[in-house]
Image (tube, grey):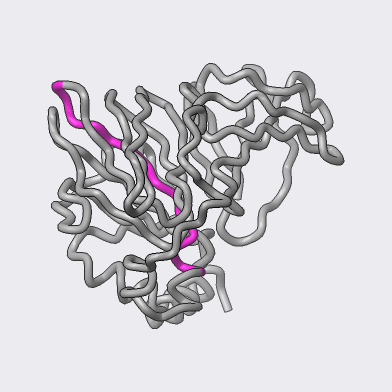
Amino acid sequence: MSQDERIKALMAAFHKTTYFKWMASQNIPVIDGYGLEDVRDVAMAPWARTGGKAAFLNLYGMEGVTGMYVGESPAGGALEAEKHFYEEVICILDGQGATEVWQEGGRKQMFEWGPWSLFAPPLNTWHRLINGGRQPVKYLAVTNTPLVMDIVHNEEFIFNCPYNFADRYAGADDFFHVGQKRYESGMQHIWETNFIMDIQSANLDQREVKGAGVRITQFELSGNSLIGHLAQWPAARYHKAHYHGAGAILLGLQSSGYVLL
């Protein structure tokens, strides 16, 4: 069986999952493939759930482990408040604004963000993105929705679960400040923070085992199991070949180059 045939078989099986059926029911584009040239140029459509525009991105290597969508908030407007029983990491691609976060019946907490800010609404908290500028805000969201939906098979539970995960979020005033807890674990440099103002200028740790001049820091947001890392390497430098398990997503932040698959 050729690689293309294997991908077709995998996608045919994926189309039968609860997550894919839910995506199809949302009436916004579902875009697949190996990758995208610029996620900011993706064609979107109005999404009733958020009150903005959006499109699902279903790249082949995600394989039902992670979900991803690109969204847009109108100029001077705000998205609908929502909560959900899955983890989500949000990267602001363009624009400036703020996010409100609160537990059911609790006080609202607000923090501001700009281009390339990174944050994660704590699990099952209410949250709402507010556009503070005159241009649309574009953002990229990565989730573990496929795993949750394909285990639970119940949208009512996922989007209306009343449980407050106070161990994840209890409304601390400094919750969305930039975290200062950084440490080494094995060969990894870990940064526990619930907010990064600008991932393009974040201070990264040296990791030359990956190549001369390479810097890598793993970030852990809002107590999530869904984590990631920031990597930087010098111009005209090869990043050592490696592989990921299913669900890994690569987002290029600056410069230009290519990926061998």
Q: Report x, y in % for residue 125.
A: 40, 51
Based on the displayed image, in which of its 4 quarters is residue 137 positioned? top left
Q: Quadrant of the N terminus?
A: bottom right
Is 83 or 190 nearer to us in this picture? 83
Q: Which residues are magenta?
A: 134-147
User: Quick check: 227 left or right of 137?
Assistant: right
100 in relation to 47, above or below: above
Residue located 29% across and 61% down the image: 30
Is 185 or 107 nearer to us in this picture? 107
Whether residue 59 is visible here, answered yes or no, is no
Residue located 51% across and 33% down the image: 175
Is 105 or 203 nearer to us in this picture? 105
Is residue 146 in the magenta section? yes
Q: Report x, y in % for residue 240.
A: 75, 37
Q: Report x, y in % for residue 63.
A: 52, 66
72 in relation to 95, above or below: below
Is residue 161 in the magenta section? no
180 in relation to 138, above or below: above
User: Quick check: 135 left or right of 34?
Assistant: left
